Amino acid sequence: MEILMILGAFAGGIIGALIGGLPAFILLGFIGLAGLTATGSADLVGVAFGHILGPHIAFGGGGVAAAAYAHRIKKLEAGGDILTPLAKFNDVKILLVGGVFGIAAYMINYLYSIVLVIPTDTIAMTVVTLGIIARFMFGKTGLFGGECPNGNRVFVPTKESVPFLIVMGFAMGTMSSYFAVVSDLMFFGFLLSAASLIFTQMGFPVPGTHHITLVAAYAGAATGSVLIGALFGVIAALVGEFMGNTFNSYCDSHIDPPACTIFVLSLFIFVFL
């Protein structure tokens, strides 16, 4: 753990608050894809997941936590709004909350990955942890939500049926596990899913699929089977809907359903496959 990394995490959290949680995550997708397509290497993928722009820092730290705080001080209408760039409020306190949570994200992930060596996607686990901390610090609806007029369905703009989720999970899971198994591109599907959320940001009903693509890639790479990766893509789609309904339906902050899904299923994959 170095002071420059902590400083970078502070800056990353502020950036996430400035531009908004979802825009920061979309930026991750485009940076990572640029690294794969322009250089044929994973250099920029490392930047995308790193200690400044990583999803635990810019999204979970800066975007999610700062939005919950902005709602607490009655500036942001919905605490689960991860689309709005918080720079619009011209409030340095909101930015500083993002920065502090960015540092917390770096330190928590360091604890999970380096100190405790937990066999899971520790970045996703950190995003979940920060979402829970932010809800208890700034929210009023509790862990599982409550009767809130601004129900948080920001990340899931459409309500999918079970058959729809199965087909979507199979298709996205097959695509991602294929690239992970055949082309050794573990994060291609995930980055593509992240970048596709630019359409969600524009207001189109495009669902988040990055939990599907990342879980499928993990399972496919662990077993060498595209079909098993596709199966885990279906499981991830169903678990993601369950997580959204459980933690993120009627609440005043955002606990990320895709991160919950990635954390739980990657733990299973890393331990048992």
Image (cartoon, rainbow, N blue to C red):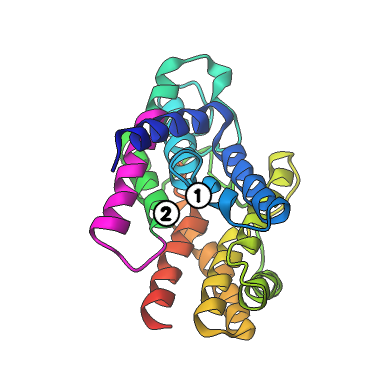
Q: Which mark is residue 73?
A: none
Of residues 196 and 207, the one nearer the viewer is: 196
Over which residues does the magenta segment extend? 99-121
Q: Residue at x 43, y 23 (%)?
A: 94
- Amino acid type for the residue under numbered disc 1: Phe
Residue wearing tag 2: 123
Magenta residue check for 119: yes
Residue 76 appears left or right of 129: right
Q: Quadrant of the C terminus?
A: bottom left
Q: Is residue 92 above or below residue 48?
A: above
Residue wearing tag 1: 49
Residue 175 appears left or right of 25: right
* Element carrying mark 2: helix
Q: Residue at x 60, y 36 (%)?
A: 83
Please identify the quarter of the rendering in which residue 25 is found.
Answer: top right
* Element carrying mark 1: loop
